[in-house]
Structures are given as structure tokens and as C-alpha cells.
Amino acid sequence: MKVPLFDMCAEIAAIRPELDAAIARVLDSGVLIGGPEILAFERELAAATGAGHAVGTSSGTDALHAIFLALGLTRGDEVVTTPLTFFATAGSAARLGARIVFADVSDESLTLDPRAALAACSDRTRAVVPVHLFGHPAAVPVAPCAIVEDAAQSLGAGVLRGRAAAISFFPTKNLGALGDAGAVITNDAVLAERIALLRTHGARPKYHHLLIGGNFRLDPLQAAVLRAKLRHLTAWTAARRGHAEHYRALFAAAHVPPELRLPAPDPAHVYHQFVVRAPRRDALRAHLAAAGIGTEIYYPEPLHLQPCFAELGYRAGAFPIAERACREVLALPIHPALAPGAPAAVVEQIAAFYSH
């Protein structure tokens, strides 16, 4: 049985009439920049997340960048975060000249260890950035600086315990656009207003620039698509959680080595990915690929060992838990459109690999 890591066509086909109607609505309006679709989506997203405010952006990366820009992050400031995350977590702050300070992750959840994060803080720390990795809510430390949550992978997990959270609507996310899109959610009205201003070059009114911002606004076509899909998010999240429990039951009954570790259980987990930690990971992945089963490695190399951060002076061994995770993590298929027999086929192949 072939099992793709993600099936975009199946997800689109399930709600195609709704998507077609949403796109037609925008085309018929003739409003392709700004307008009522943006405002409506921001209201609906804020309501769905329990946030006071939502501000649409052009991507999850730009959502993070907009938060840091709005906070006044500048050269010489420090930002503490995890090395086990997508590049944008650190890159969006580094673009403003901030110095990235990494701290290791929890061995159980693979999210930022709050004690390690606090130990890494100094009097120059302007923000701590926990990442809700793979849909697992991270513990948020109590720190004497801004807490900026990277919630790119965790919409629906009840995040927003800090100053602001950045969300990604990359097509494969739990709520995916038909291209790049993102948003900031926050309970800080002043911060939300500043981000909304910065995303349009800091101009208000048009051609009168109060701040130096950029062009990172959400477009109405993506907003309309996201409005249609947002109505299905609760059901899709339940499907992901159901697949995760199915995987757990199958693994409990399978003959796999005890060293193969499943995601840490958490009732708030939204399973953007179902990531196991596997002995002989690369050989297992090759075996699954030969059987027609899609997998992915998130992430093969920790950020502190990336060439662009060499000037920070970190060496291999600096963050042993994150580094070991990069050698072990393997994402298995778990999207809402997963076929009923797919988890069994995946676990069967994993058991077959380890039996040899």
C-alpha cells in the first residue's frame, strides 16, 4: 500500500466547491489587495484561537519578522530559542541584527527546555522564542523579556501565552493556504496595530509613512481560502488526533525495539507531524521509501551548526539532546485524508524493518 506523507489533492477535493466559491467571491469583488476578506478572516481567526487580535501576513516567516520589528528588536539585542526548529525561528530575528542564543530542548517533548532558556538569558535578552514543535505545545518560561511563540505548526493547540504568536498557513500546515500565508495573534492591541502598520510599509494614510516597514500583507485570495478551510479545522484536528492514537495502539502491539520512541503524549497536541525517534533512522527511511511510504526528517541539522551561524561559536556537542534528535527524528504520514489502512501499513513496514 502506497502512503504519501501528505495528500494535497485529497484535501482540496474534499472541499473543492467551498474553495471555488471563495475564490470566485474575490474575483467577482475585484478587490485583490486588502479589503473585507482580510478583515473577516482576521476576526474569524482571532475568535477561533481565543486571541484578542489577529493580523494577517504574507507568510509565517513574515509573521515572526513583523513581531520582532514591532518590538523594536535591533543589533546587539539577544534572542533565546531552540536549535531544533525551522530556520525562520532564528533567521527572522537575525535579519534585524539580533544575536541568536540557543538553548537545548527537553528530551521528552523536543521543545525548548524552559530552564535551559532562562539560563541562557542575559541583560541583553529581548525575547525568548519557544517553538510549539510538530504541534506539541511547548512549556513557556516566565522570563523578564518578551515571549514570542513560534506557533507555525500548532494552530488549534491553545497557544498564546506570551506577547504574541506567529502562525504559518503553508499549504501542508493543519490550516493551509493555496500558497504562502501567515498571521500574528496577540492580546496586545497596541502591538497588533503596529504590526498592521508595518506590513504595509508603515504607511497611513497611503504615501505617508509613519514607520519603516515592509510589504508582508496577506492577500484576499488566500484569506478567502483560509476562511473556507477554517470551518473544517476542528474536524481535521480531531482526525489527526485519531490517527495519532491509532498509531500508538498499533506500535504497542508491534514488535519494534524499545528505543523507537513515539511523540510525547499531550492532550493539546494537534499532530502537525507524527514524529518518531528511530534507531538506524536513515536505513529505516530508505526501507519505507522502497515500500511506497512517504516520510520526512524535521530537521536533519540543528541551527547552531548551520554555516550562517558559525560566527556564534557553537560546536558539535553544545546541545546534545537537539543534536541526537536530528539523527533520530522521522515524520510519518498523519494528514486528515489518511486512508483507513494507512497507519497499519506504515507500522507493519517499520516492524518488518526491525525484524531483520
Image: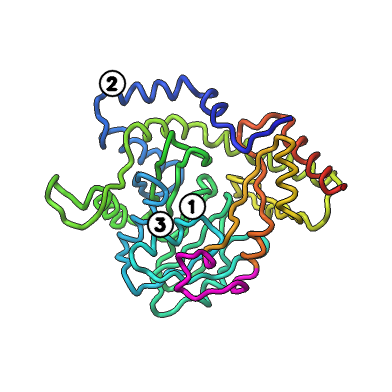
Q: Are marks 1 and 3 in contact (CB under 8 Å)?
A: no
SS assignment at label 1: loop
Nearest to N terminus: mark 2 or mark 3: 2
Q: Label 1 to label 2, Cα distance in Å?
A: 33 Å
Q: Which residue is mark 3?
A: 164
* Mark 1: few/some/many CA within 10 Å (<14, 14-19, 20+): many
- The residue lying toward the viewer, choosing from 349 and 268, is 349
SS assignment at label 2: helix
Q: Are marks 1 and 2 in contact (CB under 8 Å)?
A: no
Q: What amino acid is found at the position of numbered circle 1 in the picture?
A: Ala
1 vs 3, front mark: 1
- The residue lying toward the viewer, choosing from 300 and 21, is 300
Q: Which residue is mark 1?
A: 151
Q: Position of residue 329 (x, y in %)?
A: 66, 54
Magenta span: 304-320
Nearest to N terminus: mark 1 or mark 3: 1
- The residue lying toward the viewer, choosing from 230 and 105, is 105
* Mark 3: few/some/many CA within 10 Å (<14, 14-19, 20+): many
Residue at 33% x, 64% y: name it.
96
Q: Is residue 139 visible?
A: no
Q: Label 2 to label 3, Cα distance in Å?
A: 34 Å
Q: Which residue is mark 2?
A: 28
Q: Label 1 to label 3, Cα distance in Å?
A: 10 Å
Q: What amino acid is found at the position of numbered circle 2 in the picture?
A: Asp
